[in-house]
Image (cartoon, helix red, strand yellow):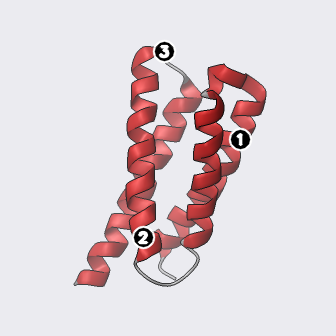
Amino acid sequence: MSQPRKLASALLLFTGVAHLLYVLVAGDAGGGAGSAIAGVIYFGSGLALRRPGAWPLWLGAVLPALGGLGGVQLLLARFDPVMLLFVGIDVVVVACCIHGLVKRAA
């Protein structure tokens, strides 16, 4: 498994748990049910990236990109440093997964 893929997997596993904990601590201010669902999806995507193949890379590129866009919307409505961290993690994960997809195609 390549280093970028390992990093993306570790970050998705971390942010999946962090999303759930943030909802438990902050409730609706932490994004509520949507954030909790994102956490479960991110954790599953992090596990999938531990498997070979291109489909986990596609999941890791598309789902955090969508989540990051949602996070940016929340940040524009109300600044939250935790949400900023989540969006930053999304950016790194998407970059790592796109790197993996480009290397596979080359």
Q: Residues within 10 Å of mark 2 (few under 14, many from 20)?
A: many
Tell me the quarter of the image containing the C terminus. Answer: bottom left
Q: Rounded to the nearest whole Å, what is the CA distance between mark 3 and mark 1?
A: 20 Å
| Residue 42 picture location, percent across and down | 58, 54
Q: Secondary structure at mark 1?
A: helix
Could you tell me the amino acid type at mark 2?
Answer: Leu
Q: Secondary structure at mark 2?
A: helix
* Residue 8 tag number: none
The quarter holding residue 54 reads bottom left
| Residue 22 picture location, percent across and down | 70, 33
Q: Residue at x 33, y 65 (%)?
A: 98
Could you tell me the amino acid type at mark 1?
Answer: Leu
Q: Rounded to the nearest whole Å, what is the CA distance between mark 2 and mark 3?
A: 31 Å
| Residue 28 picture location, percent across and down | 66, 21
Q: Nearer the viewer, residue 102 or 43?
A: 43
Q: Residue at x 58, y 76 (%)?
A: 50
Q: Nearer the viewer, residue 67 or 1?
A: 67
Which residue in the protein does label 1 denote? Answer: 20
Q: Nearer the viewer, residue 33 or 61?
A: 33
**In the rendered structure, which disc, 3 or 1, sits on the residue that comes first in sequence?**
1
Above or below: residue 50 compared with residue 65: below
**In the rendered structure, which disc, 2 or 3, sits on the residue that comes first in sequence?**
2
Which residue in the protein does label 3 denote? Answer: 78
Q: Residues within 10 Å of mark 3 (few under 14, many from 20)?
A: few
Above or below: residue 77 compared with residue 46: above
Q: Residues within 10 Å of mark 1 (few under 14, many from 20)?
A: many
Q: Does residue 16 appear left or right of residue 8 in this picture?
A: right
Q: Residue at x 46, y 39 (%)?
A: 87
Q: Residue at x 64, y 26 (%)?
A: 30
Which residue in the protein does label 2 denote? Answer: 57
Could you tell me the amino acid type at mark 3?
Answer: Arg
